[in-house]
Each structure stands twice: as structure tokens, then as C-alpha cells.
Image: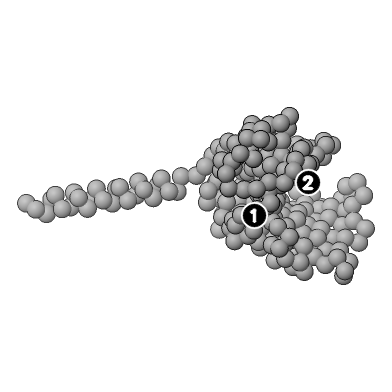
């Protein structure tokens, strides 16, 4: 008579365990900012959030649109660790309302003289980490062979992340002796949504090479080109 209750208890424990695993595996499909920094905050409200020190309100290093002016922005003086990298945080504002939160690898974490393949590996590791939380990522520009874009030659290929449902775009650009590569992917859902960005460049021997990663939490457009 004691075997049945014991079996029922075991089954109940298994069900509870599976439910807990399901809750842990539940993916985020919408965002309202990054941590305590919520879209729509004013610069003063963002400064009042404890934990980070901020520089003066200046201008963002990238614009929402290729033809748009850079937004007013402020960058953190302190840095954070995420996915094994050191990031500075940039908050950009549109009409005094928080529009974007960008985490950008610091100069110490940029690591000069890296090959492009190593930089792409860093991006793929970041993408794989974010897929667990936000679901599959996708490219946002069409793939095409090398063509003239303005004053540079550019090609874009789509790549599928190994053992993953995510894809990303990898652009190769050449201009005035400088070779550069950019990788991008965005969440399938949104906006608001999350975009991951990588930039790699190889200039002259004195300039060396650099590899920069960005995590962008965006309230509206999920690409630099609208």
C-alpha cells in the first residue's frame, strides 16, 4: 500500500522539475529598455538610476538612419562585464526620451591585431549566448555579391550559426586601402528589439587591426539603415 503514494510523489516531483526547466527556458519576446534604463526616460531620470556614472550629454556615435543626424547621447564612465567582455554603455535620446541603449566593447577589450575570422568567432559566441535568451536572430539586409556602394566596394553574405536557428549577415567592405567587415543580426520580433553588431578593420601596418562588438537595445528601428 505504500508503493502507490511513493510513485505518485515521484511522478509529482518529475512534473514539477519539468515545469521549472520550462520556466527557465522561456525566452524573452519583448523589451522595454535595458535593466533599469527604460525607453522614454529623460537624461536626468537615467542619471538617477544607481550603479553607473555618466559623462556629459553629447552625441551618439551612430545615427538611427543613414541620412539622420546623430542623437544626443551620454556614455558611462564605469564599465560592466557581459559574456566575457568589458562594455561601456551609451544612452541615446530622441526629444529628451531614451531611444536606444548600446553596450560597446571598451578600448581595452577591442584587442588589436586580430584576424577577421577571430572577430567573427567572438560575434558568433555572443550571438549564441543571446539566442538562448531572445530566440533566433535574423539578418536585415539582402545578400549580394561585390558591388559599388558610394565610394567603396561591398559584398554581403548570409551565414547560419552552427547548431542554431539563427542567421546573421556579414558584409565585407574595401575603401582607400582599408578592408573592413561588419556582422549584424536582430531579433525576429520587435521593434522594440535587440541587435548585435560586430566591426573589424584592417588598415595600414601602423593602424593595425581592431575588433569591436556592440549590443543594441532599440526602441524603434532595428538597423542603421531604417
Q: Is residue 80 left or right of residue 13?
A: right
SS category of the residue bearing label 1? loop
Figure disc tally:
2
Where's residue 38, x and y in %? 60, 36
SS category of the residue bearing label 2? loop
107 to 75, vertically: above or below: below
Q: Earlier in the sequence, mark 2 or mark 1?
A: 2
The quadrant where residue 127 appears? bottom right
Residue at the spot of label 2: 61
- Crowding near the residue tagged with mark 2, few <14, some 14–19, many ≥20 C-alpha atoms within 10 Å: few
Seen at 40% across and 47% down, the residue is: 22
Comparing 216 with 141, the one in front is: 216
Comparing 134 with 83, the one in front is: 83
Residue 168 appears in the figure: no
Q: Tags 2 and 1 in contact by the CB under 8 Å rule? A: no
**Residue farthest to the left, as pictured:** 1
Where's residue 7, x and y in %? 18, 52
Which callout, 2 or 1, points to the residue nearer the camera?
A: 1
Residue 113 appears in the figure: yes
Q: Is residue 58 left or right of residue 48?
A: right
69 to 148, vertically: above or below: above
The quadrant where residue 226 appears? top right
Where's residue 119, x and y in %? 71, 62
Distance between the alpha carbons at the discs numbered 2 and 1: 17 Å
Residue at the spot of label 1: 79
Where's residue 206, x and y in %? 87, 69
- Crowding near the residue tagged with mark 1, few <14, some 14–19, many ≥20 C-alpha atoms within 10 Å: some
Seen at 78% across and 41% down, the residue is: 58
Seen at 53% across and 48% down, the residue is: 133
Amino acid at each position: 500500500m505504500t508503493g502507490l503514494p511513493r510513485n505518485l510523489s515521484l511522478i509529482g516531483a518529475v512534473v514539477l522539475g519539468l515545469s521549472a526547466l520550462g520556466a527557465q527556458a522561456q525566452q524573452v519576446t519583448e523589451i522595454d529598455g535595458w535593466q533599469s534604463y527604460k525607453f522614454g526616460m529623460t537624461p536626468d531620470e537615467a542619471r538617477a538610476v544607481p550603479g553607473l556614472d555618466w559623462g556629459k550629454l553629447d552625441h551618439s556615435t551612430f545615427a538611427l538612419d543613414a541620412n539622420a543626424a546623430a542623437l544626443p547621447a551620454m556614455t558611462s564612465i564605469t564599465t560592466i562585464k557581459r559574456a566575457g567582455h568589458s562594455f561601456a554603455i551609451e544612452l541615446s535620446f530622441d526629444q529628451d526620451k531614451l531611444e536606444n541603449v548600446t553596450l560597446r566593447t571598451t578600448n581595452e577589450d577591442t584587442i588589436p591585431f586580430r584576424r577577421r575570422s577571430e572577430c567573427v568567432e567572438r560575434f558568433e559566441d555572443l550571438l549564441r549566448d543571446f539566442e538562448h535568451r531572445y530566440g533566433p536572430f535574423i539578418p536585415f539586409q539582402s545578400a549580394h555579391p561585390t558591388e559599388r556602394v558610394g565610394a567603396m566596394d561591398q559584398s554581403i553574405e548570409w551565414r547560419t550559426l552552427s547548431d542554431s536557428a539563427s542567421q546573421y549577415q556579414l558584409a565585407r567592405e574595401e575603401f582607400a586601402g582599408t578592408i573592413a567587415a561588419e556582422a549584424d543580426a536582430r531579433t525576429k520580433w520587435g521593434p522594440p528589439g535587440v541587435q548585435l553588431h560586430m566591426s573589424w578593420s584592417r588598415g595600414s601596418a601602423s593602424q593595425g587591426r581592431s575588433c569591436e562588438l556592440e549590443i543594441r537595445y532599440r526602441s524603434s528601428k532595428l538597423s542603421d539603415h531604417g
